[in-house]
Image: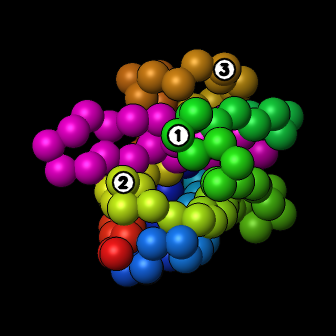
């Protein structure tokens, strides 16, 4: 089973950028769909972006044009480049994995999760 560890979170001013990484170990990374979700205090976990095992990407409307998801199968890592950050992007960001191709965004479809990394955007 794949295990996930996120990194790259931190404090950034509005308009700034951060790059999150999610390193996978165990299992077959190249065969899984990877996704990023986020959860702000008092809110439900929400979908951010997804990249399938055949590199098809999908984004939530609220990050489209600002965030980019990518993967490096040689390094067993998925990335989330976040540009033009807004105050409302503040949340704990989680990466998640599911074997095979997934074209849906519900967090319940992803059985494997990382521990999360905090992203705080300040004014």
Residue depth check, mark 1 versus mark 3: number of the one nearer the observer? 1
SS at mark 1 in the image: loop
Query: What residue is disc 3 on?
Result: 103
Q: Secondary structure at mark 3?
A: loop
Q: Is residue 20 part of the magenta span, yes or no?
A: no
- Structural distance between the alpha carbons of marks 3 and 2: 25 Å
Asked if the residues shown at circle 2 and circle 1 are in contact, with their CB atoms under 8 angstroms apart, the answer is yes
Q: Which residue is mark 2?
A: 88
Nearest to the observer: residue 48 or residue 25 = 48
Which residue in the rendered view is the most extreme toward the front? Answer: 123
Element class at badge 2: helix
How far apart marks 1 and 3 lie (CA) works out to 18 Å
Residue 111 visible? The answer is no
For disc 1, the marked residue is 62
Answer whether residue 102 is visible to the viewer in this image: yes
Residue at left 45%, top 43%? 37
The tag earlier along the polypeptide, 2 or 1, is 1
Residue under the image location 76 percent in, 67 percent down: 75
Give the extent of the magenta segment: 27-51
Residue 91 position, x and y percent, is 32, 57
Crowdedness near tag 1: few (<14), some (14–19) or many (≥20) residues, C-alpha within 10 Å: few
């Amino acid at each position: 089973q794949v295990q996930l560890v996120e990194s790259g979170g931190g404090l950034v001013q509005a308009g700034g950028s951060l790059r999150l990484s999610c390193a996978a170990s165990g299992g077959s990374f190249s065969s899984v769909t990877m996704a990023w979700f986020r959860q702000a205090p008092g809110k439900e976990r929400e979908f951010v972006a997804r990249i399938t095992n055949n590199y098809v990407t999908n984004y939530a409307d609220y990050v489209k044009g600002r965030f980019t998801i990518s993967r490096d199968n040689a390094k067993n890592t998925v990335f989330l480049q976040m540009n033009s950050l807004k105050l409302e992007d503040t949340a704990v960001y989680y990466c998640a994995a599911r074997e095979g191709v997934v074209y849906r965004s519900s967090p319940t479809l992803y059985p494997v999760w990382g521990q999360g990394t905090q992203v705080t955007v300040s004014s």
